Amino acid sequence: MLISNFDIFLILLVAVCLGGLLGLERTLAGKIAGMRTYALVSMGSALFVIISQTATVLYYNTSNTDPLRMISQIIVGIGFIGAGLVWHRSSKVTGITTAAGLWISAGVGIACGFGFFVIAGIAVALSLLVFTLMWYLETRLKRFSYDNENEPKDAGDDSEENN
């Protein structure tokens, strides 16, 4: 049974909110990967599940067709590309949100490839909200977790400087 467009929206919205909530804690703890990264990874996972479920229903009786195997290979490939976007320079890591966004983009491409344009559109709209509105909120929240030198606090560091 196919799920409704409204249910797709709700599933992806819940995934964004719950992932963002996990990332909120990381942001407040001063960690590099925060709200946007966690929200995108969570939504990407939900997106791939929705696509897999829908493709299985639509292509169940087709001979020699396994859309799930094809999707899994795209996800593995995009993981290697995403890993190449993440850079570590001195004490800073960059590119994590870009890699998560690229992963979402792969999900959008898979959805479009199967003709699931509404799923893709919902994912894009929510991703843009994550990139913009959550960025705004995240930058405001980081003021509470960063010291005067704009360096993330290390929650595991028990040195006298951080106490």
Image (spheres, rainbow, N blue to C red):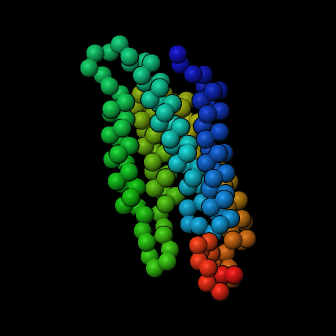
The percent coordinates of residue 103 (x first, y second) are 45, 48
Residue 134, quarter of the rendered image = bottom right
The percent coordinates of residue 115 (x first, y second) are 45, 26
Using the image, determine if residue 2 lies above or below residue 139: above
116 or 138, nearer to the observer? 138
Q: Residue furthest front?
A: 158
Answer yes or no: is residue 132 visible. no
> Residue at (47%, 26%) from the top-left corner?
53
Using the image, determine if residue 128 lies above or below residue 85: above
The percent coordinates of residue 56 (x first, y second) are 42, 22
- The total of numbered circles placed on residues is 0
Q: Residue furthest top?
A: 61
Q: Is residue 42 left or right of residue 85?
A: right
> Residue at (45%, 50%) from the top-left corner?
102
Answer yes or no: is residue 21 visible. yes
115 or 81, nearer to the observer? 81
Q: Is residue 51 left or right of residue 84?
A: right
The percent coordinates of residue 74 (x first, y second) are 35, 41
Q: Quadrant of the C terminus?
A: bottom right
> Residue at (45%, 56%) from the top-left corner?
99
Q: Residue furthest left?
A: 64
Residue 150, quarter of the rendered image = bottom right
> Residue at (53%, 37%) from the top-left corner?
46
Using the image, determine if residue 146 lies above or below residue 54: below
76 or 6, nearer to the observer? 76
